[in-house]
Image: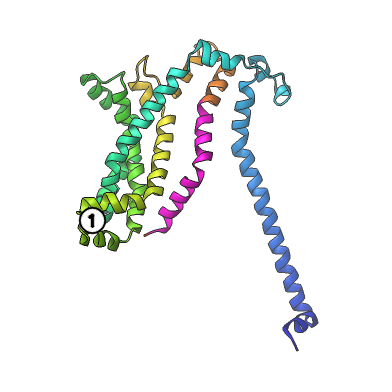
Amino acid sequence: MTAATVTRANPVARKRRRSRAGDSRAYTIFRVVALVVVVVGLAFPIVWMILASLKSNIDIYNAAKTFSFVPTFDNYVTVFGEQSFLPFFWNSFVVGAGSTGLALALGLPAAYAMSRFTMRRSASTVLLARIIPAISLIVPWYFIFANLGLVGGYGAMILAHMFTSVPLIVWILISFFDGLPVDLEEAAQVDGLTPIGAFFRISLPLSAPGIATAAILAFIFSWNNFLFSLILSGSQTKTLPVAIMNFIGYASIDWGGLMAASTAITVPIIVMAVFFQKYVVSGLTAGATKG
């Protein structure tokens, strides 16, 4: 007698199979519903922001016109015309690229050394920079940068943003270097490379996904940073998160202009996240499974 014949003849087995199929179907429905709830919850503020950027201030306050309204681009004219937001984009790019580049220059060799020499205490010390509240450092930093004549320039903001970028880069790359076989570097040294040469010609190319992931995340954090730029920037070096405050007055708020400026700030990051998504996901996944 075959197993299929036994199953058909056994009502208990058939009941168990139907129960398992029902549980699987219920779990699938639960996953779909949960996914829809999460996506709607995360996407709704962004959708509302984009829609509000196309409304007048009167329509923004009118709940009946949440989705039904006559779109206008006057808010974007205000952002890029009257407020001249393009220089602020350049300032944010300079600070983000500068801080990310310098953080990589420091973080790459630091992460490699901490990985190869098992410097876990040093790695934990670096992590403290992510734990310490940034606001507690503003006053001493302002005092130091003011005495050095750096307040109001790019230098102070780049150095301040590196405070959060370096620990992020170090901790992402440590896991990558932990996952690289030491035998490859030893074989390269046997072939005549120095330890530094093996680092540049073997370890760095193999860690390209981790480097891309760390650089992208560090740039995004710098792009969105508000506190450091608010205190350390000048009138000519304001970044986008600080410039957006131009729409907030003492007695009123230009919600249309504020939403248009917020959309203009957010869209480049969304495009970057979508375009580099596979690099970020593969980098974080590889770093999490190695070692």
Q: Nearer the viewer, residue 36 or 170?
A: 170
Q: Nearer the viewer, residue 87 or 141?
A: 87
Residue at x 41%, y 29% (from the top left corner): 225
Residue receiving disc 1: 117
Please tell me whether residue 272 belongs to the stretch shown in magenta: yes
Q: Is residue 68 above or below residue 114?
A: above
Identify the image quadrant of residue 18.
bottom right
Is residue 133 visible in this depiction of the protein?
no
| Residue 196 image point, x, y percent | 22, 50
Q: Quadrant of the N terminus?
A: bottom right
Is residue 96 visible in this depiction of the protein?
yes
| Residue 144 image point, x, y percent | 23, 24
Identify the image quadrant of residue 161.
top left
> Which residues make up the magenta segment?
265-290
Residue at x 32%, y 49% (from the top left corner): 204
Left or right for 94, reference 268: left
Residues packed near mark 1 inside 10 Å, few (<14), some (14 to 19) or many (20 plus): few
Q: Quadrant of the C terminus?
A: bottom left
Identify the image quadrant of residue 267.
top right
